[in-house]
Image (tube, rainbow, N blue to C red):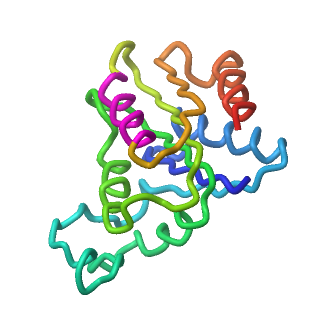
Amino acid sequence: MNILILQASPRGKGNTAWMAEEYKKAAEAAGHQVTLFDVSHKKIAGCLACEYCHGKGNGACVQKDDMQDLYPLMAEAEALVLAAPIYYFTLCAQMQAPIQRMYCVNAPAKVKKMAMLLSSYSPGVYDGATTEYHDICRYWGATDTGIVTAKIDEQKTEETKQKIEALVQNL
């Protein structure tokens, strides 16, 4: 299976990046093809709501930024993993921009399965992100293969690693 992981933490050695790497390792060990795309260090602007994509653009966004590198990966992905830190009760801005920019294609054609990896220093702050994720799964017609959250005392632990590895088994 062709898996795309969107990693949205600007901290390359941080907790979210670790979770994304652990998912990648487990998925590759299970024989899947995995691309880890670090959206946090890309220049991806928010949607302009200009509707160019639904008119003259014929599905292409008028903005020419680093999202151009992501569109082909999204088009080929069969599974999508969203890995994001929670700073203030919802997905961080680095993850929101690429999600919103998918508006031009409506839904990635091949994505049939999704998973989510979230980290935060606080417990009980995941509802906004998980609600959005479930809404995206429903809208795209993708199966939710699971969510792993890791608050401060669960980050970079063997138990969290095992939960992440279990998500790969749901593919």
**Left or right: 34 with respect to 56?**
right
- Front residue of this view, candidates 99 and 9: 99
Image position of 143 with respect to 72: above or below? above
Which of the 4 image quadrants contains residue 164?
A: top right
- Front residue of this view, candidates 134 and 119: 134
Q: How many marks?
A: 0
Looking at this view, name the residue that lies furthest to the bottom.
Answer: 56
Q: Which residues are magenta?
A: 126-138
- What secondary structure is the stretch in magenta mostly built from? helix
**Left or right: 21 with respect to 141?**
right
- Front residue of this view, candidates 171 and 40: 171
Instruction: Give the residue displayed 58% in from the left and 59% down from the top.
Output: 110
Image position of 161 with respect to 21: above or below? above
> Residue 54: percent from the left, percent from the top?
26, 75
Instruction: Give the residue displayed 69% in from the left and 25% down from the top.
Output: 161
Which of the 4 image quadrants contains residue 157?
A: top right
> Residue 140: percent from the left, percent from the top?
44, 49
Instruction: Give the residue displayed 84% in from the left and 43% down from the top.
Output: 29
> Residue 48: percent from the left, percent from the top?
17, 67
> Which quadrant is home to the C terminus?
top right
> Residue 57: percent from the left, percent from the top?
29, 83
Residue 55 covered by magenta stretch: no
Instruction: Give the residue displayed 45% in from the left and 40% down from the top.
Output: 137
Residue 130 covered by magenta stretch: yes
